Amino acid sequence: MTTSVETTAPVRPGTPAWRALLARIAEGAEQREQDEQGPYEVIGWLKEAGFTRLRLPVEEGGAGLSLRELFAAVIDLAEADANAAHVVRAHLWFVEQQLDSPDPEAQARGFELLRSGAVVGNGFSEQGRKDVGLHFDTAFTPDPSGSGFRLNGEKFYSTGTLYADYTQIWAAAPNGRIAGVVVPVDREGVTVVDDWDGFGQRLTGTGTTRLDDVRVEDHEIFDLGLPVDSEQPPSHHGAFLQLYLQALTAGVLRSVRNDAVGLVRRRARTFSHAASAPHEDRQVLQVVGQIDADAFAAEAIVLAAADAVQAAADSVSGGIPDETLAAKAQLAAAQAKVAIDRFSYATAAALFDVGGASATQRRYNLDRHWRNVRTISTHNPAHLKAAAVGDHRVNGAAFPANAYF
């Protein structure tokens, strides 16, 4: 199913071509939400523009961006279309995995897949009774033929897989271990269902992936790793994934600001007791200014935290980062979420303080911003992150090994 694209240099953020791409994406974003039309075409544009290869080294067909530059690009994309930016989150994590791979042959295969233009989706989380984290009902079992495996189970929150060429599945493996595999979404036994029914981020394909006796070759299995309940090695990947969500929120808040400005500029009517026309009303302008400041703050927080994740990434040796720097990356990502969650909901809701009742009409779809940031924030509870930060500061406690605390 892989759609091969010519490996040309990616469009670099900040260039006229980049701005034109974002404008093209933004032009139809609101209508796609209204019509519940998935951003299939947008993902194609991103592939053609090389967005999916921004972090790859230049010699591997990428742009060689730093993590700070990548997160700035994600914020740009989320401003244009929050759904499309969320769709590629798992893919960009896959890129990070390839960059850190200690196995040259596996890394070469990963780079080749990325150069082909393929998009990789996500099959990690499950709905069930087991704790969130590395506890799976989905499982690899030895194939009766004596070689390879069979993969069976069901994943939910499969963000991006609906639009992807491949999906990365994590599951229980023999001897109490965890393994991963990247399989084409059109492989026999793989079924991707568009059944995500969240009230926000509605076009991200965050629904079900079913795996029915999927054949997996021995060479496709990777990261048989440590037993599930053993101590996990230091990692900055959880911090990357978590900070990515805050980048989405920062982009949404920019879009809130844009809509606030547009709403005030086009309003002709005002209240009889208002001081002046909406575009001259100091109280209305104050609300717009506060929204703008919050959007600025969210972006600044994300980019500052990205530097901590970059430091950990730069320290990777043999696939594992420096333990202290990995902890600092976890801390920064947690701090970013706790801080941004404290104001993002209110900022998105403040959009209605610059308009009258007409701003609540469905045809304007302005409630999408609050729904989107609130949905993004539910990936992990802010109170657990705040408690972990406090425990770290007061008692020197280490952060949980996975990103789901």
Image (spheres, rainbow, N blue to C red):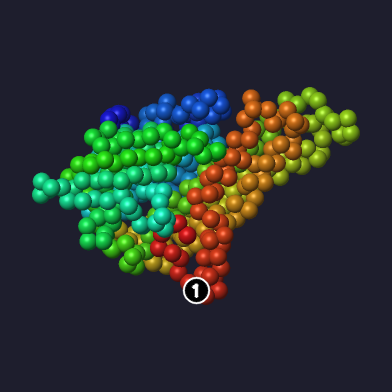
Q: Residue at x 57, y 60 (%)?
A: 383
Which image quadrant is residue 372 in?
Answer: top right
Image coords of residue 136 (percent x, y) = 34, 54
Q: Is residue 322 above or below residue 109?
A: below
Query: What's the residue type where badge 1 is placed?
Result: Gly
Query: Mark 1 = which residue?
Result: 396
Residue 62 percent coordinates (x, y)? 34, 40
- Where residue 37 appears, x then y in whole percent? 48, 26
Quarter of the figure with residue 386: bottom right
Relative to 324, say whether 212 is above or below.
Answer: above
Placement of 81 over or under 248, stated as above or below: above
At a point 60% along the width and 38% down the height, the residue shown is 369
Q: Specify the quadrant of the image occupied by residue 40.
A: top left
Image quadrant where one finds the N terminus = top left
Please state which of residues 127 and 280 is positioned toward the viewer in this rendering: 127
Question: Relative to 362, is 287 on the left or the right?
Answer: right
Determine the residue located farthest toward the front in the rendered image: 129
Q: Residue furthest bottom?
A: 395
Which class describes the residues within 10 Å of circle 1: few (<14), some (14-19), or many (20+)? Answer: few
Residue at the extreme left of the image, as rendered: 146
Name the residue at 40% across, 63% down.
401
Quick check: can you spot residue 268?
yes
Residue 114 in sight from this viewpoint: no
